[in-house]
Image (cartoon, rainbow, N blue to C red):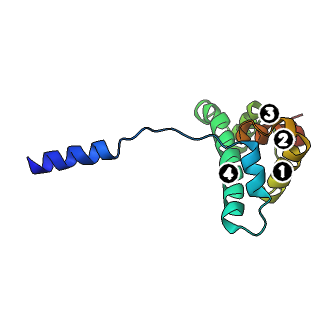
Amino acid sequence: MRRTILALGLCVGFSGPAFAETVSGNELLSACEAQDDLAQTGFCVGYLIGTIEGLRLGTSLPFLATMQDAPLSDKIAAGETVFGACIPPEANYNQHKDIAVAYMKTHPETRHEAARGLILTALREAFPCQ
């Protein structure tokens, strides 16, 4: 009986509300410009990498399942077309950061919006698919 109560208590204790907080462009820009704060710089780069790779994977998943015999590069290219940004393989995350920061600086009217959307728009403008 004690084990059941303990297990139930643990389940209830760890079952708080689950939600994801949206990071705004203002917050991301502030983190990306914090040159002397390693934690903020790490957050900036980590957020950018997570957003870009998440968008790439999310848009490529249908093609991974349906184009089983196609080379992986074709599946990724199909996903990037949906993603709307055809990022060259040579482009690195520092370049992605520069593009996102430049976009947020030149579009202050949108910085209150979700950072992930601003990153996507910046990459679409920088690397449009032909």
Identify the residue position indicated by label 4 in the image: 47
Q: SS of the residue at dot 1? A: helix
Q: Are marks 3 and 2 in contact (CB under 8 Å)?
A: no
Identify the residue position indicated by label 2 in the image: 122
Q: Amino acid at mark 3?
A: Gly
Splitting the image into 4 quarters, where does residue 17 fall? top left
Could you give the CA–CA distance between mark 3 and mark 4, rounded to whole angstroms? Answer: 19 Å
Q: Earlier in the sequence, mark 3 or mark 4?
A: 4
Q: SS of the residue at dot 2? A: helix
Q: Is residue 93 above or below residue 51?
A: below
Q: Earlier in the sequence, mark 3 or mark 2?
A: 3
Q: Is the residue marked by circle 3 packed among few (<14), some (14-19), or many (20+) residues within 10 Å? A: many
In depth, the one of 79 and 105 nearer the eye is 105
In depth, the one of 85 and 12 nearer the eye is 12
Q: Is the residue marked by circle 2 packed among few (<14), some (14-19), or many (20+) residues within 10 Å? A: many
Identify the residue position indicated by label 1 in the image: 101
Splitting the image into 4 quarters, where does residue 74 fall? top right
